[in-house]
Image (cartoon, rainbow, N blue to C red):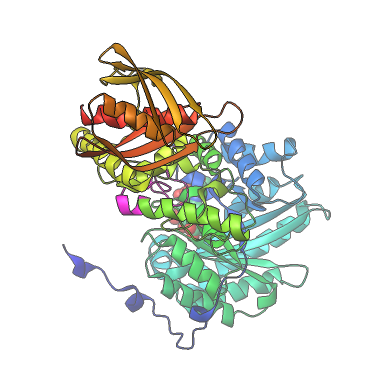
């Protein structure tokens, strides 16, 4: 490939900051957020949002807690203008939300943009012009001075026209973006921003938002961080400036770029939900927000119903959120491989114990950086079973979907049975399919609809009496190949007596392990019993489910017996 036609970024726009501070900084609070879903996000859609979709997006952003929302480029099109006006007409903007509108530095567009704001209680006018060499030379055919003058004139236009047209009771802020900041010589970006500030005159009550976009991401995030720190250190009137980062994702590092920008001094992050936006998109606000959350920082945004957020965004943008999208994709809380499933299962068990014993619910789970429940995702989706899965995943699914708490060696036995199935089918086994595989293998068919009956033996009835200190007397009816046999025995306990009954059927049987637990709570609780037995020199597990614990254990022994002969 002709790689020599590309130049290293640092050869085109070098940054020197040997005493950089940002690598030692820590992010300790959420930035101010700006959602540009309705502007940058919308302008990049194959089919831009219609009014209903725009409104759904706006309402979603408000509900989630975004306080600054760029609602469009009202001078660009009738649809953008109408949408902006509809928010005033419908009184749709809550007290604590500030809308923002974008314009180029062109008088007619600036005036129309400001006209669109009439009636809003507060708003921000956002003006941009590209400042980088290739744009000066190719797009604007301007030198540096003319580029700066465009920013100055545009800002002056904004100031003058606001004063002339907007009432005193309206709070209007100003944002300036030197578009293509990353490719702009730093000293020139600084010069333009200073010139813009000279016009706007920021002060205690009159902040200015200076937005330094990686319009096209072309360097590693550390270079951008150097650029942000350099600007942050060299800008005058820094205390009145809200330094904003607007990052695209051309190199796939938009999130890292925004995070490093925060370390380097950015106060505000602009982006779109799930990374919508031009080309590879704007930075994903959900990922940046939830990355903060997983560090114990309140993102100030409600992500607790992430699937609802996703479905509204998919409706509005007519684009699908990919299955591996951080925090929200279909597969991100799913583990297929055996060792991951095993670790997750153990992690959940350890967590339950830790909470019960100490009340400490600090999150520390193998392979899961976030508790899916915090985002409204269910644990059932965490583990899925295919040919890569081991005992942990199988046991986890049966535990979460059926309350079955399988003993470890039974897990190993079942896992091999499931693997035979997945090796043959090649695909995933759903929780329902797993239940059918399990039931077909271990349970009398009558208990699970849709399965063929199997097994030479079945428990038909029993009567047991145990006197104090004396042996259990058992009379049991067992169907043998369809014919009922009534057997009377005794033993040290019910299981011992039942084993004696099985021996009367001509089998050698020795119980190796036995456990039981309730499957549900309350008076109508059902019990599950698990028996590992050596029957006629075959070691196998059997499972029984019944409202009576004794019946469940007898069924488990019958299950193991039938399996030796299947
Ligand atoms: C990085 C970003 O995403 S910025 C946002 C970009 N979004 C959009 O552009 C969406 C909406 N835009 C539009 O609908 C149109 O571009 C309009 C209505 C704003 C303007 O349309 P037109 O007047 O036909 O101009 P056109 O779209 O061709 O824009 C190019 C012209 O604008 C000039 N221009 C581009 N950006 C700016 C700017 N920020 N400030 C001043 N002039 C600018 C160009 O130099 C060019 O001028 P020229 O025709 O004299 O060479
Ligand atoms: C207008 C600016 C902020 C922009 O969208 C960009 O540079 O990507």
Provide the major secondary structure of the magenta segment. loop
Specify whether 417 is left or right of 153. left
- In this orientation, which residue lies closer to the viewer: 58 or 456? 456
The residue lying furthest to the front in this view is 470
The residue lying furthest to the bottom in this view is 19
Q: Residue at x 35, y 48 (%)?
A: 408
Question: Where the C terminus falls, by quadrant?
Answer: top left
How far from the left and from the top, in percent, is residue 294?
A: 53, 60
Looking at the image, residue 366 lies above or below residue 43: below
Q: Number of marks in the image?
A: 0
Q: Is residue 83 magenta?
A: no
Specify whether 298 is left or right of 251. right
Q: Quadrant of residue 248?
A: bottom left
Looking at the image, residue 4 lies above or below residue 247: below
Q: Is residue 325 magenta?
A: yes
Question: Where the N terminus falls, by quadrant?
Answer: bottom left
How far from the left and from the top, in percent, is residue 120?
A: 75, 47
Point out the stretch of residues depicted in magenta. 318-341
């Amino acid at each position: 490939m002709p790689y020599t036609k590309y130049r290293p970024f640092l050869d085109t726009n070098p940054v020197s900051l040997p005493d950089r501070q940002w690598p030692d900084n820590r992010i300790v609070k959420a930035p101010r957020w700006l959602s540009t879903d309705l502007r940058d996000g919308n302008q990049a859609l194959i089919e831009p949002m219609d009014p209903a979709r725009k409104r759904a997006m706006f309402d979603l952003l408000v509900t989630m807690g975004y306080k600054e929302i760029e609602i469009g480029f009202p001078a660009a099109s009738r649809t953008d203008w109408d949408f902006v006006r509809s928010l005033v007409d419908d009184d749709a903007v809550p007290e604590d939300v500030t809308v923002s509108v974008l314009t180029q530095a062109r008088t007619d567009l600036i005036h129309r943009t400001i006209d669109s704001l009439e009636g809003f209680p507060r708003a921000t006018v956002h003006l941009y012009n590209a400042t980088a060499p290739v744009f000066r030379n190719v797009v604007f055919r301007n030198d540096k001075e003319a580029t700066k003058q465009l920013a100055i004139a545009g800002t002056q236009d904004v100031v003058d026209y606001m004063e002339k047209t907007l009432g005193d009771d309206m709070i209007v802020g100003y944002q300036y973006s030197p578009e293509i900041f990353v490719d702009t010589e730093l000293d020139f970006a600084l010069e333009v921003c200073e010139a813009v500030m000279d016009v706007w005159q920021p002060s205690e009550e009159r902040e200015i938002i200076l937005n330094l976009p990686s319009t096209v991401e072309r360097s590693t995030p550390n270079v951008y961080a150097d650029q942000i720190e350099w600007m942050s250190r060299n800008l005058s009137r820094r205390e009145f400036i809200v330094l904003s980062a607007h990052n695209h994702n051309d190199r796939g590092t938009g999130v890292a770029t925004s995070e490093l920008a925060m370390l380097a001094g950015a106060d505000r992050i602009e982006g779109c939900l799930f990374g919508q936006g031009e080309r590879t998109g704007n930075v994903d606000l959900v990922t940046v927000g939830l990355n903060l959350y997983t560090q114990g920082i309140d993102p100030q945004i409600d992500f607790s119903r992430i699937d609802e957020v996703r479905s509204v965004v998919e409706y509005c943008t007519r684009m699908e959120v990919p299955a591996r999208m951080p925090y929200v994709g279909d597969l991100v809380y799913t583990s297929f491989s055996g060792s991951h499933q095993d670790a997750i299962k153990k992690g959940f068990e350890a967590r339950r114990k830790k909470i019960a014993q100490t009340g400490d619910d600090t999150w520390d789970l193998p392979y899961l950086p976030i508790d899916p429940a915090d985002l409204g995702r269910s644990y059932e989706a965490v583990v899925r079973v295919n040919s890569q899965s081991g005992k942990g995943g199988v046991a986890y699914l049966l535990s979460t979907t059926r309350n079955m708490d399988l003993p470890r060696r039974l897990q190993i036995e079942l896992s091999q049975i499931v693997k035979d199935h997945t090796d043959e089918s090649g695909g995933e086994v759903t929780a329902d399919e797993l239940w059918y595989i399990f039931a077909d293998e271990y349970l009398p068919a009558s208990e699970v609809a849709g399965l063929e009956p199997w097994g030479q033996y079945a428990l038909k009835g029993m009567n047991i009496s145990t006197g104090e200190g004396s042996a259990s007397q058992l009379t049991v009816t067992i169907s043998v190949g369809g014919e009922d046999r009534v057997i009377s025995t005794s033993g040290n306990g019910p299981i011992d007596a039942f084993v004696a009954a099985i021996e009367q059927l001509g089998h050698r049987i020795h119980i190796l392990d036995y456990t039981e637990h309730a499957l549900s709570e309350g008076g109508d609780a059902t019990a599950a019993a698990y028996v590992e037995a050596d029957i006629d020199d075959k070691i196998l597990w059997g499972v029984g489910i019944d409202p009576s614990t004794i019946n469940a254990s007898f069924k488990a022994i019958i299950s193991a017996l039938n399996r030796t002969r299947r």
